[in-house]
Image (spheres, helix red, strand yellow):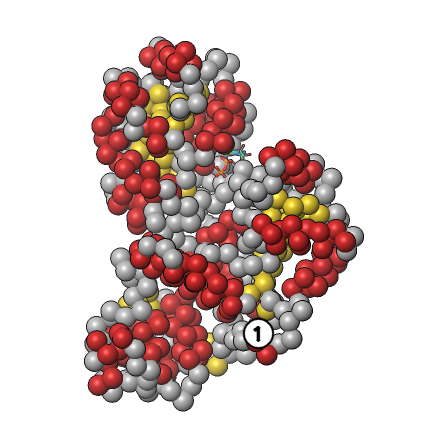
Amino acid sequence: MSAKKANLSGELKKYFGFSTFKGQQEQIIENLLNGKDIFVLMPTGGGKSLCYQLPALISEGTAIVVSPLIALMKNQVDAVNGLSSDDGVAHVLNSSLNKTQTKQVFDDIKSGKTKLLYVAPESLIKEDYLDFLKDVKISFFAIDEAHCISEWGHDFRPEYRNLKSIIDKIADVPVIALTATATPKVQDDIQKTLGMTNALVFKESFNRPNLYYEVQPKVNVDKEIVKFISQNKGKSGIVYCLSRRKVEEFAQLLQVNGVNALPYHAGLDQKIRVANQDKFLMEEVDVIVATIAFGMGIDKPDVRFVIHYDFPKSLESYYQETGRAGRDGGEGHCLAFYDPKDIEKLEKFLAQKPVSEREIGLQLLNEVVGYAETSMSRRQYILYYFGENFDPINGDGAKMCDNSSNPPKLKDATDDLRKVLELINDTGEKFKAKDLISVIAGKETAVTKSYKLEQTSYFGFGKEEKDNHWKTILRQATVQNFLQKDIETYGVLKIAEKGRLVLDGKLEHSFMIAEDREFDLTQTKAE
Ligand code: ADP
């Protein structure tokens, strides 16, 4: 083993020029070379590409890299080709190639020259590609951006759904799946869909201790952002807006206020878009006002703030977008403006979608609302969402959010927690937060009626308190591991081990909470 290790380090140096592996790269590569299926969950910038590029370069045959981003594939291929002294160790295979080019790629694969073949999943289904790939030596499959397989991910691509059967048709070789966004639900989905529930899972922390998280009510938002940017003059930053119109308007408003800003969205002429992006990268402008079209593949290390004029549709998106701040480990301020009315707009938009998409969309929005309204450590909330427990007192970056730097007063809510646990237990652990709150508040709904919940002794037991209090209890009990969201149905709340101990009277655990924030902005004078 040690000889092999020394060898791998030598190959790392030879191809990439690095003297040490980053994080768990070495174990990942060793296990892949030993024929294991691997699942890698690592935040952006963690060094995922090397986990398949290096083993591909030193293995016999061709590794097939499935990637959804045709635009970025070319860059990857160029980068890999720059690593080796041999020509053409990496190729793209897609419909943009003409006959001669395709033949060249096929010849290079046959001769064993091609070590990495980048394909989009939709190309992989093409019969002539399939027939060809069946007959050549494949070293392994790498599924990049593996969250695209899951409807619960933030970038679902139906073409990814059939990957397993295509892989099986081509070769019986190891599979390495990689992603930078995976909630436990998405992780479960990826592993099941790819038939790799026995894969070795390598997960790195998603904590970004240098990022400061803050949420402000969306009141006088234009003025607030202009003020923030003026106080951070000369620093590089991104302002995300939902609509193209807003991007244009707000970029202008910033310019009028003396901020060196430019817009970016998919509706702009390609030349202008590229020019604006380049100016941002070259530091000719400080601030880019953009839709979510901006950012993919952008690696600017010194982005000092990411402001969300509008809240995004999911916490994954929020994490990805804010993740563009402070890549160099320096300051990174993530400020989001929240108005429940914006969430209602997003809900209305979802109403036009097919049922399953709508249900998922609403659940994801629910988490966004939870994040916005929480009075807990925001870092703890986000990391819980990614399946990580974070210590809000001593964890790395514990003080780096508005709630933690100015902590609200806590009160003991253990009695209320116990009542909620009893309710969940006695009603068979089959309801979502919304339905539990209807029972607690004594509000009849279709669900309470169909399960005859009005007839239980729990109906209306908490109506003296505001609904917000019970929402707080449910959210915070989940993040503090008294409750857990069922992985299959997602929204359904079940009792976790720690919650069972409370129910059984075995854990006199005190449950301290601060009420989550209420955002009724209708009373506040808007701009
Ligand atoms: P990801 O795909 O996880 O976002 P990348 O593969 O793009 O990450 O790697 C992020 C950066 O880290 C790249 O600039 C890459 O060259 C660098 N990197 C990767 N592995 C190492 C290593 N072992 N030592 C030093 N730098 C590394």
Looking at the rendered image, the quarter that the N terminus falls into is top left
In this picture, is 145 found above or below 113? below
Which residue is at the front of the view, 257 or 160? 257
- At 38% from the left edge and 28% from the top edge, which residue is drawn? 119
Which residue is at the front of the view, 462 or 343? 343
Tell me the SS state at disc 1. helix
Residue 297 coordinates in the image, percent (x, y): 54, 37
Most distant residue in the right direction: 258
What amino acid is labelled 1 in the image? Leu
How crowded pointer 1 is (Cα within 10 Å; few <14, some 14-19, many 20+) is rated as some
**Residue 284 placement: quadrant:** top right
In this picture, is 168 found above or below 148? above
Answer whether residue 156 is visible to the viewer in this image: yes
Residue 146 coordinates in the image, percent (x, y): 37, 41
Q: Is residue 182 left or right of residue 126?
A: right
The residue at which mark 1 appears reads as 521
- At 55% from the left edge and 65% from the top edge, which residue is drawn? 338
In this picture, is 322 found above or below 418? above
Residue 458 coordinates in the image, percent (x, y): 28, 84
Residue 42 coordinates in the image, percent (x, y): 44, 44
Which residue is at the front of the view, 454 or 233? 454
Looking at the rendered image, the quarter that the C terminus falls into is bottom right
Answer whether residue 390 is visible to the viewer in this image: no
In this picture, is 127 found above or below 342? above
Label 1 within 8 A of ligand 1 by Cβ: no
Q: Is residue 511 left or right of residue 191?
A: right
- At 45% from the left edge and 31% from the top edge, which residue is drawn? 70
Which residue is at the front of the view, 20 or 320? 320
Q: Is residue 285 left or right of residue 6?
A: right
Most distant residue in the bottom direction: 464
- At 71% from the left edge and 51% from the top edge, which residue is drawn? 252
